[in-house]
Amino acid sequence: MSDPLKKEKRKIKPAEPAGMIRRWQLAAPVVLCVIGVLLNIGGKMMATATKLPFHFDTAGTILASALGGYIPGIATALVTNLFSYRTDPTTVYYAPLTVFIAFMTAMLYSRKKLGKLWQVLLYTAGLVLICGVFGGAIAWYVQGVDIEGSDPFLIGKLNNAGFSSFTSWYIANFVFEIFDKTAVIIFVELVLFLIPEKTRKRFEMTLWMQDPMPVITDSDSESTKKVKGKVSLRTKFRAVLIVISLILAASCTVICLVLFRRYSINQHKYIAESIAKLAASVVEADDVNRYLDGEGELESYAETKELLAHILNSTEEVEYVYVYKIMSDGCHVVFDVDTEGMEGNELGDVIPFDRSFMPVVPALLAGEHIDPLISDDTYGWLLTAYEPVYDSNGECVCYAAADISMNSIVDYEVDFIFKQLCIFIGFFALFISVALWLAKFSIIYPISSMSHVTEAFEYDDEYVRRDNLRKLTQLDIGTGDEIEQLYRALVKTTDESTRYFEESKKNSEKIEAMQSGLLITLADMVENRDESTGDHVRKTAAYVGIIGRKMLELGYYKDQVTERFVSDCERSAPLHDIGKIAIPDAVLNKPGKLDEEEFAIMKTHAEEGKKVIEKVISSIPDADYLEEAKNVAGYHHEKWNGTGYPEGLSGEDIPLSARIMAVADVFDALVSRRVYKPAMPYEKAMSIIKEDAGKHFDPLVADAFIKAKEEVIAVAERFDARGTNGQQA
């Protein structure tokens, strides 16, 4: 069996080899990212060297986003921040802001929202507002108002005008951003203007290798968003990806925070213990008791206290440094270094034990070493390390202690979380963009394209079927994975189904033609027994078809009259007198008028015909039209007013096909010559049909027949020309 894909591929000639296109598609984002990072870093270096009133550090990000979309833009922003982190650690805080700029720029350019001047101006104003508000808030958090790049002259003027330092700095920062973002947008728009449209398109990130492109695009089509009112694959994939990523991110964040807190506390315990040991090393242990006995004027006391103060001031993390002699009545102060905003306790002061220390008091009284403690008592939330000080006899005479504020540890944790969050937001945006990009071109676009094409499949005629296959084949999906296998299987199945459908239809048409031919032959055999009827079955069949099509045109009985119904009636019409096969020849071919007994016998042909067709139906499967043949044969002599036979049905209780047959049958009987009567003129026969509407005939059926007068007479004249009608001039 031939492959439909190969046939279509011979007709489609890509402009460039697919391998070359794919390699460039993979290289394009890397090239854009490198160019963007160089522009960002180089622009900032140039602005700093020339002392211009802007940073120019987002030009590369915006250009990469405009040309390549989300992934190159976000990657450029992240790489720039990470690269700059080595020389300026504060740049990590700006990662979410630069990523947002990349995202917003890519979205607006991909949706063609920056094609007009007012749109570009509005976009620039938006950048200024976002960077001014959020960038200023980040800068304030990281460094305060004394930011490099702010205009001290403008801040001074604003301060003199009565504005606070914060307000003055923020206004100056906004002015700074206006210059910066305006210069950046002018530069980017100029570069985009100079790059030819064809070249710009080569930088668009896509893995869609199919040719021709399907109707599904980025600006699309609700077909990738909603599927018959249900959630689409694209929406489901995006939601699942984001939810899973957020859960993983939250889990990792909690784990990192727990590990960082443990590490931070251990590190600060180490620092506190080191400072306590250092403090213990400068204390003259043999002089401690003399200090407490009132000999504090000793020269060594002042020197030791000065050394302890130097130790405290040289370590930023340590809050307090002191030396206590632990006794049963409390902590006796030996040394207590003054701190900023708080004077230390005096020599000899007794400080009661805090509740947090009560469990370790016995160990302290015994001169034993204790692990650092975390307490929240008289002097605040502190991490405390005690180091025993031994005299020359090896006895513990006091403890040197160092306190670190737990609030400073919390500040470290908050700063860590903030940095982690900034980095996470950037990489999360990049990860989501890459994942959605891969899903879009490797899963969503191929499946949506197949769905879009197959949804419109119709099998009503051969041309439409072939066009369906052509459209599906031209997608030429080449993802190189299970999606491509699914596509090829779908094409193969569709091709085989189309062929099978065409063969089945041809066979069905042959069978139907054979059945119709056999039934017509049977009808002819019955008709040939009636020497007076001529081409009655063929003429009445033609009249039935004319009436049915006219009713369809006029909209009569819309719930019943369809193309299929009309076809079934027309095919069934030749069998309306099939019951005459049971009528004796003496009655059937009597040259004169039938008497009552003979007429009673003749009337049985309706019931006999119904029985014959019921037997045929039981032996021929899927012959739906024979149901109408049964109605036609059994009830075509019923009358609208209920005076007909065999059951005396009236109105719409009579099957519609039989009501149509009644008009055709009577008209042909009127205009045809019989051995017992001459043929009636067409016009007079038409008037009789019209007069009997509502009595013998269904009014709507009779109306349709009258309105199709020209077609009816044309059929009658055609048979008359063959000499079977006997129409009088």
Image: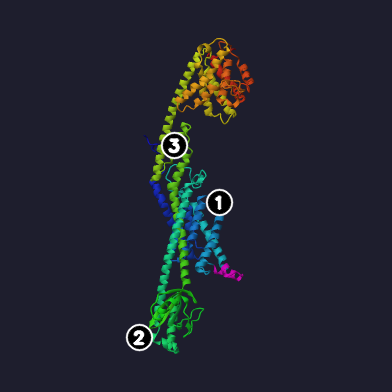
Of the residues shown, which amino acid type is indicated by label 3? Arg
- Choose top left, top right, bottom left or bottom right for residue 269: bottom left
Of the residues shown, which amino acid type is indicated by label 1? Lys
Dot 1 or dot 3, earlier in sequence? 1
Q: Which residue is mark 2?
A: 393
User: Is 285 located above or below residue 637 in the figure?
Assistant: below
Measuring from the top left, give residue 313's x and y in whole percent. Answer: 45, 78
Of the residues shown, which amino acid type is indicated by label 2? Asn
Residue 334 appears in the figure: no
Q: Residues within 10 Å of mark 2 (few under 14, many from 20)?
A: few
Asked whether disc 1 touches disc 3, contact meaning CB atoms under 8 Å apart, the reply is no
Find the residue positioned furthest to the front.
597
Q: Which residues are magenta?
A: 151-167
Measuring from the top left, give residue 22's x and y in whole percent. Answer: 40, 48
Q: Nearer the viewer, residue 507 or 43?
A: 507
Of marks 1 and 3, the one in the foreground: 3
Q: Which residue is mark 1?
A: 116
Of marks 2 and 3, the one in the foreground: 2
Residue plotted at (44% across, 44% down)? 446
For the N terminus, the quadrant is top left
Q: Which residue is mark 3?
A: 470
Q: Residues within 10 Å of mark 3 (few under 14, many from 20)?
A: some
Dot 1 or dot 2, earlier in sequence? 1
Secondary structure mostly seen in magenta is: helix
Residue plotted at (55% across, 57% down)? 126
